[in-house]
Amino acid sequence: MPPLRLRSLDAFRGLTIAAMVLVNNPGTWVAVYAPLKHARWHGLTPTDVIFPFFLFIVGVAIPLSQPRPGRVLRRAAVIFALGIVLNGLPGFDWASIRIPGVLQRIAVCYLVAAVLFLTTGWRTQAIVTAALLLGYWAAMTLVPVPGYGRGDLGPEANLAAWLDRGLLGPHIWRVARVYDPEGILSTVPAVATTLVGMLTGWWVQTARPPRTIAAGLALAGAIGTTLGAVWSVWFPVNKALWTSSYAVLTAGLALLVFAACYAAIEIRGWRRWATPFVVLGVNALALFFLSTLVAHVLTLIHVGDGHLQKWIFERAFAPWAAPVNASLAYAVGYVLVWWGGMWLLYRAGVRVRA
């Protein structure tokens, strides 16, 4: 079967990466609207759905692209290496460089999901997905943590954080110090998120009528959202821990958004509105890497008593609006600048592949 490219998936990917760039690049972190922040610990904000949406999309694309083993290994290695580059700049202190990260988690989840796609059928993949979610729930709530006991889901006392400190040592997220939001054990349910996406990819490439496909996506999304919300009573929704309830809830929400995109574009034929997002979606990983790299470089260039990013914000945005609005305006402007760059690539027919 030849690879299938869905404009609705490209639009969903573009919408997701635009949101990711937006929330990662405020003008100042001291003035940000609450929905553009992550939940402090347990709970969910709009920002908390962005990363699982992207992993879900990575999964959907696997059956559609029909990957080859050699390409899977190379792509995962390149994405992981790019994540290390972002973490290491500018000095690459190998004694303390953070090993986990967003791109690293994407690489691992893609690798595991793609290998399962190449070696198993959808039924086995569904069983593995359920096993990962249930196994993670059991581990996090039943396995005692030395010095803390079992079932404590606090930032320092939970099993995932304890393992990250023990296995990664100084190579974890310096902001938190006691846990890593893209750590080792919490990647297990993130793989499950990707597998839900992959099962969705199986579904959308069937010979069923498009309306049946859209209805199936919406029904699965409603079930997943409800199940995740109910599960949170016993295993709270938590992005940093990627709890099983969080994985199921956000996968359900992703299915609902994808169902809406699919119905609008593939069934209704409403394609024009999606073009700006498709422009971003076809080169999403390149956009994430380059926008993160440039944002980091802007903080390394010293201007006066600060850095270039601060100088741009204080002179071009801060004088014209309240701090929280100026901060948002900077983020929107940053997204638009990158949209311009991605539009040039799109018009030239350039598709950057790892």
Image (cartoon, rainbow, N blue to C red):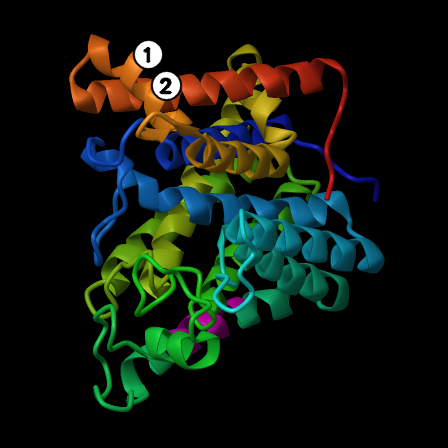
Is the residue under label 1 in contact with that under label 2 (CB below 8 Å)? yes
Give the CA distance from mark 2 to mark 1: 6 Å
Q: Position of residue 182 (x, y in %)?
A: 44, 60
Give whichever of 290, 244 is nearer the camera: 290
Find residue 123 and report its horizontal and vertical position in percent: 62, 66
Which residue position holds label 1? 316
Q: Nearer the viewer, residue 285 or 274?
A: 285
Q: Please provide percent x and percent y for residue 220.
A: 44, 49
Q: Image quadrant for the N terminus?
A: top right
Magenta stretch, overall SS: helix
Q: Which residue is at 47% across, 79% downward?
A: 167
Which residue lies at the image location 58% right of the left edge and 59% below the top edge? Answer: 109
* Disc 2: which residue: 312
Amino acid under label 1? Answer: Ala
- Residue flagged by tag 2: what amino acid is it? Ile
Where 313 falls versus 290 (above or below)? above
Tell me, for residue 293, which label it has, or none: none
**Nearer-the-camera pick, 87 or 20:** 87
Residue 268 appearing in the image:
no
Q: Which residues are magenta?
A: 129-136
Does 33 sit left or right of 354 as displayed? left
**Could you tell whether 29 is left or right of 96 in the image?**
left
Q: Quadrant of the C terminus?
A: top right
Within-10-Å neighbours for mark 2: few <14, some 14–19, many 20+? some
The residue under the point 44% across, 22% down is: 334
Query: How many labels, in total?
Result: 2
Look at 42% across and 35% down and name the residue there: 299
